[in-house]
Image (cartoon, helix red, strand yellow):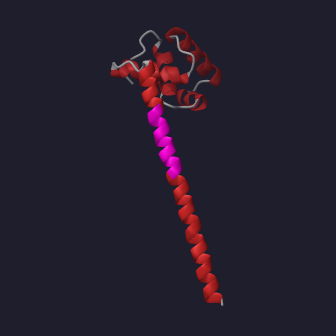
Amino acid sequence: MERVLTELTPECEFTAQMYASGYEKKEIASIKCRAISTINNQLQEAFRILHVRNGRELARKLYERMSGISFTMDFSPIGRTVVACSLLCVFSFSLYHEQSDMRRGRRARVETMERIRRVET
């Protein structure tokens, strides 16, 4: 892996990159032949130096550095309103279609039961 988080030691950076990539602490410890406590210490040190609070922020910082693009969620109030309304529309339509699919399924079961009853009589 290429050095991206250069303020960390190479060993600590490798651990941080693996963790940000989705590896569990136990897996990292196994791959690096280290104790889980060592991995925990390296991650805590990386969090402290990089000023991040958790793995999600660590991953964001890593991918921002790799891509050169800053990922922010700072939208204007109008932008937040547009996003919220768009999501509300999407969820409303999906709920409407889900309910209509359920009604169609119920109708199909009723029709099947009616056919079965006709055949039996």
Foreground: 8 or 86? 86
Q: Of helix, strand and loop, which mostly describes the magenta segment?
A: helix
Q: Using the image, determine if residue 82 lies above or below residue 88.
A: above
Magenta residues? 85-96
Q: Is residue 56 above or below residue 8?
A: below
Q: In the rendering, at what x and y percent does residue 33 appear?
A: 57, 27
Q: In the rendering, at what x and y percent does residue 13 appear? A: 47, 17
Q: Quadrant of residue 43?
A: top right
Indicate the position of residue 47 as horizontal and vertical percent values.
Answer: 55, 14
Quadrant where the image shows the N terminus: top left
Q: Quadrant of residue 41?
A: top right
**Residue furthest toward the left?**
68
When the figure is inspected, residue 99 is found, relative to residue 121, above or below; the finding is: above
Q: Position of residue 26 (x, y in %)?
A: 61, 30
In the picture, measured across the screen, residue 34 lies left or right of residue 20, that is right
Q: Can residue 54 be seen?
A: yes
